[in-house]
Every structure is written in C-alpha cells, then in structure tokens.
Amino acid sequence: MLRMHPILRQLHGGLVVSCQPVTGGPMDRPDIVAAYALAALDGGAVGLRIEGIANLRAVRLATAGPVIGLVKVDLPGSPVRITPLVDHVNALADAGADIIAFDATDRPHPVPLATLIAAVHAAGRLAMADCATAADGAAALALGVDLLGSTMAGYTGATVPVGPDLALVTALARLGAFVVAEGRYQSPAQAAQALQAGASAVVAGSAITRPEHVTAWFVAAMQGVQPGPGA
C-alpha cells in the first residue's frame, strides 16, 4: 500500500456511518446523534460523517474516532449547500473534525474551491471533495484535496437516481485518489459492490440512522399487497 495519512489508513476498507438525522425530526438532537455515532462504532464502523457544529461537538465529546465534518446551509443565489464558506471550515475544525467535506461540483461557489481547500489545510485537517462527476474529482485533485467522495452523484440534476453510482466510484478510483463511495448505499451488498468498484471506504447513512426513511421503504413495499385473512 502506498504511504497513506494515518486517518485515511484507519478508514481504508471500512464503513463510515453518516449520522445525519432528518432535519426537524424526533432524532434531530445532538445527544441522539452522539448515541447513533457510538452505536455505529460498536457495530464496526471505522469512522463517522457528522453534519452541524452542535452535533459534531457532541460526537467529539463521545469519541476520538475519525470524523468527517460538514455543515449544510442554504445561501441566497447559490446551489452549493455543503460547507460553502471559510467560516464553516474554521468552525468545523474548532469543533474537532478530522476531515472537512465540501461541495466540489462544477457549479457557482460563493468561495473559490482553492480558498476552501487552503483553509482546511491551514487548520491542519484533511480536505474531502464531494463530487458529482469524475471531472469534479480531477479538478479537486489538481487543487490538492486529500480524498474524493461520490457524495453528489445524482444530486445536481432534476431527478435523483434510485441506486448508488458505482460507475462514478470506478472513475474516481482511476484518478489514483482515496475514494469514499457515498450516496444511496442502502444495503450491505451495495457497500461491498462499492469496494469492488474501487472505493477505499464506503459511507452509509439513511439505512442506518434515519428510521423514518427505513420505515417508509418497508411501508412502500407493502402497499398494494393483499394481506392474509384475519383471525
């Protein structure tokens, strides 16, 4: 194996659990996010992906495990929601993120990507580019990011696909980067397929930490199916 940063070595080949509750839902509390994080680590997760400063602080108090930190905000006139500003980078670093993730898509950004990446590195953290295409990944690598995510695959167009984008994972891996497969990984089999496609690690979120979504999947599958007779 090529020389690898210790944090990436910890993540390599493993599952990262995204503990991002439904906004405004019953699980949307920092103490519950921290509990989800500990449960994920108990189950064998090698790292965590945590959104929001309060959630990140709660998780960092609970564990020293590797954490990918991000914030999601809606800015006027910008389609970019994931860690768009240098102030967000600095807040995530102060809250204890080991890796800071940001939108690296080819869309108008309120702050140039080079500026964000420089801020991440100035804070002594690793920079993770959340990509929608292989071209996004190549551009981010040229700017000096440390790892690529397929996070934005399918989220920059009009329609979100049903399954994960394994082809993008393969394309990003061919760039020679540490690649984190992320986006609609809803089963263990899909996570294994991502590693086979070239991913260095895999993120799963809704299937583990959003019971509202998992319940809805079951309900949708059952609708229209005739039940058996009652007693």
Image (tube, rainbow, N blue to C red):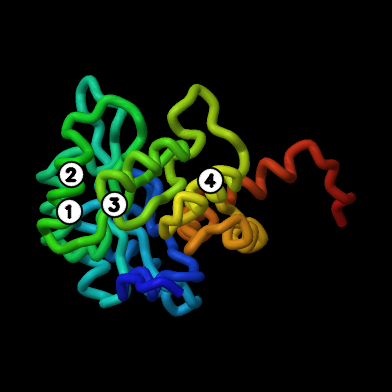
Q: Name the residue under label 1.
A: 120
- Front residue of 101/61: it is 101
State the CA–CA distance, disc 2 to disc 3.
Answer: 10 Å
Q: Do the residues labelled 1 and 2 touch (CB within 8 Å)?
A: yes
State the CA–CA distance, disc 3 to disc 1.
Answer: 9 Å
Q: Nearer the viewer, mark 2 or mark 3?
A: 3
Tell me if residue 184 can be seen. no
- Residue at x 34%, y 39% (from the top left corner): 139
Tell me if residue 9 can be seen. yes
Q: Are marks 2 and 3 in contact (CB under 8 Å)?
A: no
- Front residue of 132/191: it is 132
State the CA–CA distance, disc 4 to disc 2.
Answer: 24 Å
Against 18, residue 129 (above or below) is above
Q: How crowded is mark 2: few (under 14 residues within 10 Å), some or many (20 or more)?
A: many
Provide the secondary structure element on which disc 4 rests. helix
When asked about the image quadrant of residue 16, the answer is bottom left
Q: Name the residue under label 2.
A: 116
Numbered label attached to residue 145: 3
Task: Identify residue type, mark 1.
Answer: Val
When asked about the image quadrant of residue 85, the answer is top left
Q: In this view, does 190 lie to the left or right of 67?
A: right
Choose the circle earlier in sequence order: 4 or 2: 2
- Residue at x 59%, y 47% (from the top left corner): 166
Choose the circle earlier in sequence order: 3 or 1: 1
Provide the secondary structure element on which disc 1 rests. helix
Q: Mark 4 points at which residue?
A: 171
Task: Identify residue type, mark 3.
Answer: Val
Where is residue 117? Give x, y as percent.
20, 48
